[in-house]
Image (cartoon, rainbow, N blue to C red):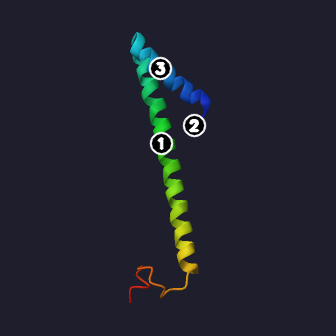
Amino acid sequence: MIDRDLIDRINYLAWKKKQEGLTAEEAEEQKKLRDIYLRNIRQQVKASLDALKQAQQGQHKNKEHGHGCNCHHCKN
């Protein structure tokens, strides 16, 4: 889960890297934190797209076909 502490630590390590460089341990920590952050963002995007797809499918099932919407049901 992405929380303020995770973002703050990522930002601090990015700042420190620019200012003075990171130790090997800090560089490894930065990589791990970024991986966690990106994995969470990907999960959120996937969940949003899945929900949108389900909502669109649900709306489509409720429509009466033959109204010219050009879906594969109405093209006939």
Is disc 3 placed on a helix, strand or loop?
Answer: helix
Q: Position of residue 33 (x, y in %)?
A: 49, 30
Residue located beneath label 2 in the image: 2
Query: For mark 1, what is the residue?
Result: 39
Measured as percent of width and height from the top left, residue 53 is found at 50, 65
Which residue occupies the foreground of this view, 13 or 36?
A: 13
Q: Is residue 22 visible?
A: no
Mark 1 residue type? Arg
**Disc 2 residue type (three-letter):** Ile
- Label 2: element kind: loop
Residue occupied by mark 3:
13
Give the class, few, some or many, for how many residues have Cα within 10 Å of label 1's Cα (few <14, many ≥20): few
Pointer 2 or 1: first along the chain: 2
Earlier along the polypeptide chain: callout 2 or callout 3? 2
State the residue at coordinates (49%, 54%): 46
Amino acid marked by disc 3: Leu
